[in-house]
Amino acid sequence: MMPHATIPPPLPCPRHVLVWGWIASIFSLSPHLLSMPPALSVGCLVVGLYWLWNVLGNHQRWFPGSYVQLFFLATSLLTIRITYGQWLGRETATAFLVTLAFLKMFELRRERDLFVLVLLGYFLLITQFFQSQSLLQTFYAIATATVSTLVLVLNHRSETPLKICWHQTGKTILQALPLTGIFFLLLPRLHAPLWTSPATAKQTITGLSESMQPGSISQLILSSKVVFRVRFLTPPPSPATMYWRGPVLWQLRGETWHSLAVPLSHPPPRPKHFGPGWIHEVTMEPNSLRYMFALEFPQAAPPGGQLSRDRQMVSLEPIDTAIRYTVISHPDFSKKPSFLELDKSWALALPGSGNARARRLAQTWRETFSHPEAIVRAGLDYFVANAFVYTLSPPLLAHDSIDGFLFDTRKGFCEHYAGAFTFLMRSAGVPARIVTGYQGGTLNPLGDHLTVRNSDAHAWTEAWLPDQGWVRIDPTAVVSPSRVETGIQEAIAREPGIPPSLNPKNGLLQQWRNVWDLADHRWNQIVLGFDAEKQMAFWSYLGWSQPESWELVVALLLATAAFPFIFSLLARVVKSASGSKDVTEVMYQKFCRKLARAGVARFPWEGALTFGERAGSLLPQNRTEILLIAKNCSELRYEKNTSPDKIHALDRRIRAFKPQGKQPGERDPLRAKTKTLEALPPNPRRGG
Amino acid sequence: MHALLSAVVDTAETVILGKRRQLRMALCCLLARGHLLIEDVPGVGKTLFAHVLAQVLGLKFQRIQFTSDLMPADILGFSMPNSDQTSFRFHPGPVFSQIILADEINRATPKAQSALLEAMEERQVTAEGETRPLPEPFFVIATQNPSSHIGAFHLPESQLDRFLMRIGMGYPSPEAERTLLAGLDRRILLKKIRSQLDTETLENMMAQVAQIHVAESLMDYLQSILAYTRIPNRYVTGLSPRAGLALLAAAKAHAFIEGRKGVTPEDVQAVLPAVTDHRLVSRNDDPQNTARSLLMAVAVA
């Protein structure tokens, strides 16, 4: 049998338009692919690549029938349902839309389908901001919008060179920027974010959590994600004493330390005396958690937060958007001991069995020393005396990890030290607890602020001493003083496998990081931080005190409507400013304006003579004058007989020219227009 | 209007009635050193028009009736052995003349058509290895019936492009027709016409046309017209650079006829329909309105 050649069906649009359409789709869809169920992402990618292959090679295209499409749809729906465990929710909906967008590639038969794909891309572009509103994301969104717009431009001007289309696209995007500014300033802000409700499980959250096990913090410090930034309004403390307090862990279960299920809701005892305070402003990145960080020890919680008895600051709402608050902290906050029996029992609780060697060691201290302070010292001395090593990659410990760490390996990270020390203290009868948080931070010399990243994560111990109350004891500082004094980077610089961002040797990279960090910080402060209050303050500053939401909306609509007019006015001003070299043209424009006010506006296509002819017939009283001026204008502009005298004469004439207004009803403008069309020469083949 | 040319038009109008605009376009075409194509149904006076023009301009006139068996030699001329049988003598064809009326050009085969069109372009004739220049001025007025008529070889676009302008005659107005019907035989009137110009004056005028000033702003206008026709999806093809040159040359001639020293937008607008009519095919407008809607779409600079 002869294999008969199959002719591929014609492409709905020129190939390069389709390829750009594909690129635009990938731009807008790929961020979602990363957060979608892997099986679905892979499937989508396969569809996308198949389609690209088809377009590039102009192969026989396969349009699946409705049963196949239904099958695809059902499969993807099922995958989404199984992965997210729910039908509704923003991740579910986004994943579904992304899948649909990829399936749409299968049915690109007509030009219209490409539009659907591109417009869906625009919409999915917005949904990216559910996940992050960072500066980087914004740049990415602008890039995506640009490429999508390019596809629309290309589709209309497929024969125009790509460069010109890029030019047009760039112009369109730039023209949209002022409009964006109007929306930014005028769109009423909601006091609560609109999209907080269904944050589904799949989101990976990096940050300190309510539990700590060996390895959890050493994992966390590999991430250089910014947690918060701090601006000090008073002189800052030295880096060694900057402990940013986070979750407090009370309970040891197995190998893992946990915080109390119910926060200690009684407010901490009021301070009896204040030491020197540090006022600082914290801008937290959104992380969907509730811990608010502050320098030890915050005096009171900022609005929206709560201070618990163990001096943890917790936000009332999950931190889904960047927040900013000002806290006053005092280093020697409360030394007046008052201890609830309940807290004491929590602070001494230990599992029934396990880590017998550590318990025995603690028992000997308990018998030797009478005062808790001496026990604490003995504990710290133990770390110093036995050559413990501070390392990011400690050997793995199996059962009874505290025993293994204290007596065998003696290598560990801050969580090992804090955990083992707290265990020892509790075994020796000294109430103790673990505090996790961050220590130090990077001073950004450009922005004059301190940036605290996940890599600054730390854990330490607090012990209860009868006449001092809770005292911070950092066993890590004993083992590796540099960790606390110069920061994590120096302490682990020689470790293999640490990310380059943590490497202090890389000067240029560090500088870049500072610049980017500053930009990100400003973005958070100025753009993301422009909430309802700031908006009010802004407009009040401009003299519009306390605008209501509806007033803002009305202003927004008015400004949006006025925008094109303002824009074209500006364009005209710019044009006339740049083109004012030609004196005769300026004079001619003035003449045209005068006639326009008298009711006879020039059509753009009319030359001076034609216009003069028409204006003369519409304004018979001024006919001679108009014709003369028009003829002079035309001569001066197009014929090479200019002399200063002529120009001055014409200028005087035009200045003196006062056209009589057109009588209303004398000739209706519509008829006047058809009349002017006759001024153009007729078609040559029609004769006449 | 230029006095001499005004006299030319007035004289011609005594024979061809009510065709002032066509006369003006023909003069434009001549002064711009272009060639003219008249396309209209039979019997509207195309041939008479060419006759009158030749007569009134005082130029040497030849008429070539194109038929399907016309050979290139019938146009260009041919060589014949001398009576002594030792050499050949070239007998110049009708193309060696100042005004040629190529009547019903679309009747002839493409071969004959190209012979004339080549001569038009080159302004010289090469036969038997010898190149002979054509007289100056050299002005071809070709007439053709609308190509839908039977037995016609439609001129392709590339050859249409050789004509600076294409115009139609149109039916006469009722008054003109009444005069025509009641008056004398046109052929007799034709003989009475006295030529108003001579070759030297015409050459002089052509030189002046080339000197007509073109302002920067007019160049802008012209270029925006060209650019507009090149926007995709409006026209089948945009105007070529040659069409741009043609438009400018015709506008200059028009300005000269109007007695101006520089080209105004009005000049461009006046000649544009005749210049672009056979070059521009709109995708949207109907052919009658192509030029007009083009002019309406481009702003005067």
Image (tube, coloured by chain):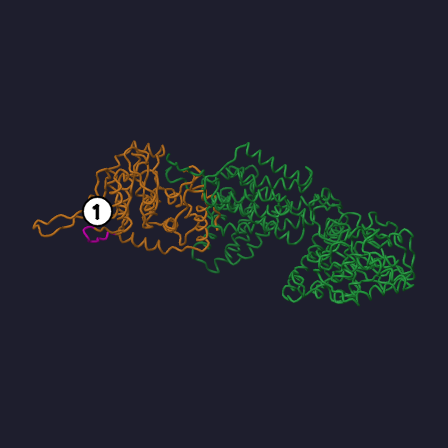
Chain colours: A green, B orange
In the displayed structure image, the side of residue A651 where residue B48 appears, left or right: left
In the image, what residue type sits under mark 1? Leu
Secondary structure of residue under mark 1: helix
The quadrant of the image that shows the N terminus of chain A is: top left
Q: Nearer the viewer, residue B4 or B220?
A: B220
Residue A177: image location, x then y, percent = 62, 51
Q: Nearer the viewer, residue A285 or A608?
A: A285
Q: Residues within 10 Å of mark 1 (few under 14, many from 20)?
A: many
In the displayed structure image, the side of residue A377 where residue A533 appears, left or right: left
Q: Residue furthest left?
A: B84
Q: Is residue B255 visible?
A: no
Residue A675: image location, x then y, percent = 48, 39
Count of marks, rendered view: 1
The quadrant of the image that shows the C terminus of chain A is: top left
In the displayed structure image, the side of residue A289 where residue A140 appears, left or right: left
Please give the name of the residue rendered at 88% of the width and 50% of the height, measured from the top-left corner: A266
Q: Chain of mark 1?
A: B
**Residue tagged 1:** B76
Residue A604: image location, x then y, percent = 50, 46
**Where is A149 relative to A364, above or below?**
above
What span is in magenta? B127-135
Q: Nearer the viewer, residue B279 or A450?
A: A450
Q: Quadrant of residue A429?
A: bottom right
